Image: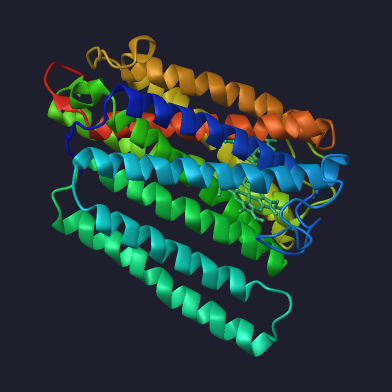
Amino acid sequence: MTIPATQSGGRAFRRFACFVVFVAVLLVWWGAATTTKQAGMVFADWPLSLGTVNPPGWLEHMIPFLEHSHRLLAKLTGLLVLALFAWAYVRSGKRALEVAGIVLLIALVLGFYIAAGSERLDAGVKQRLLLIALALSALPAGWLVWSWRARGWSLVQKLTALALLMVTTQAILGGLRVTEISNALAVVHGCFAQCFFCVLILVVMVSGEGWGRGGFLGSPAWLRRVRFAGIVLVLIVLAQLVFGASMRHFHRHALPDDGLILTQGRWIPSFEDPMIAFLFLHKFTAFSLLLFVVGMVLRLGGGRANAVIPRLNTPRRHAVAILALIGVQIALGLGVIGTGKSFWVTNVHVLNGLLILAFSFVFAVRALRGIPGGEGNL
Ligand code: HEM
Ligand code: HEM
């Protein structure tokens, strides 16, 4: 599998995309803070908060402030992604009508979800509206799949369209998590945020001038193995996020167990309680991730320099950076347990988890963009 080389963007566009990434980091932090402080259900309605645009007193108390400002920041992010999408299309100089149409369609889908989330409806109407919203969601998603395959759009156009669909989906997931009082949706919301973030990073990468020569350099056999390592790395990190998020949202007020290394005083605990299983799997996956990345650092010899990210110009250097982040993450994870979920330690743990995913994702993209040439061995 390879990612096609398509140059698009421009310096101003790329700077704007970097700004959107920065706002998205803030948003993830804010969401994590909302979860850690148990502020998620402070308003039972959505998209309004207590039936108003800005609920009274939201600036005076920490809990309403966290949840409401998370919602405001999410709206800002949605608008910024919409601007990114429109900008990419305006640059292409065509199909303004289609852009307007798709934006209206997304607004319509969002409207049905919002209506379905209304507290005043009876259960039957609610269910019908939700079904219509689900059916309508297939339209923008279908449009994306069709345009991706059939049109000569640049990669930037395709990715900004994907980011727009993802941010809308994420807002719907956040809203439904509240109106349906669902911990399962909170888990999906937490994990989907990180996937959305990866797409924004890809927009920044693709719109840069170095995209055309962005991959690692090495022999074809070596590149195949680096690609495999990159994909497995991303999958392990994603699994780790799912275990962490499940424990975080289904077992809120305390940790399922306070053992730093052992769980329930054993190396392998009983799996009867799913929360204990998630905690054990989270620790086990952390250890596996550590070993996997140590293996990458030891075996990623060779592979020539790549000018795009000067300090991380070889796969080994890139893997060393990921290893350092994992070291910090393990210390933070032990801190989360040791401090009984201190606000700052827990939030920095979530944020550093995002960084690990981002670095791993960029590694995988650079591997998939690899250019055969030169010697390398894994
Ligand atoms: C649109 C972009 C959005 C992003 C990227 C985003 C991201 C996040 C993240 C990363 C978390 C923390 C999850 C965790 O720590 O496990 C979170 C929590 C939360 N978000 Fe969002 N969010 C967005 C929009 C929204 C919207 C529109 C709402 C509407 C109400 C919302 C409601 C919530 C709630 C209630 C929580 C706390 C969940 C809990 O404690 O169970 N989010 N969000
Ligand atoms: C090294 C790789 C690790 C990664 C990438 C990672 C990532 C994460 C993430 C992203 C979350 C929050 C998930 C979400 O809500 O969206 C989380 C939660 C958690 N992690 Fe880790 N983690 C790692 C290692 C560890 C270790 C070694 C420990 C402890 C020994 C640990 C303990 C925890 C705990 C207790 C939570 C839940 C916090 C809560 O309930 O609020 N983590 N982890």
Left/right placement of residue 288 relative to residue 314 reads right
| Quarter of the rendering occupied by the N terminus | top left
x and y percentages locating residue 3 in the rendered image: 21, 39
x and y percentages locating residue 176 in the rendered image: 63, 65
x and y percentages locating residue 143 in the rendered image: 28, 63
Q: Is residue 93 above or below residue 364?
A: below
**What residue is drawn where x is 84% and y is 47%?**
254
Q: Is residue 249 above or below residue 32?
A: below
**What residue is drawn where x is 41% and y is 42%?**
83
Foreground: 83 or 33?
A: 83
Quarter of the rendering containing residue 336: top right
**What residue is drawn where x is 34% and y is 24%?**
12
| Quarter of the rendering occupied by the C terminus | top left
Quarter of the rendering containing residue 202: top left
**How many numbered tags mark residues here?**
0
**What residue is drawn where x is 40% and y is 31%?**
17
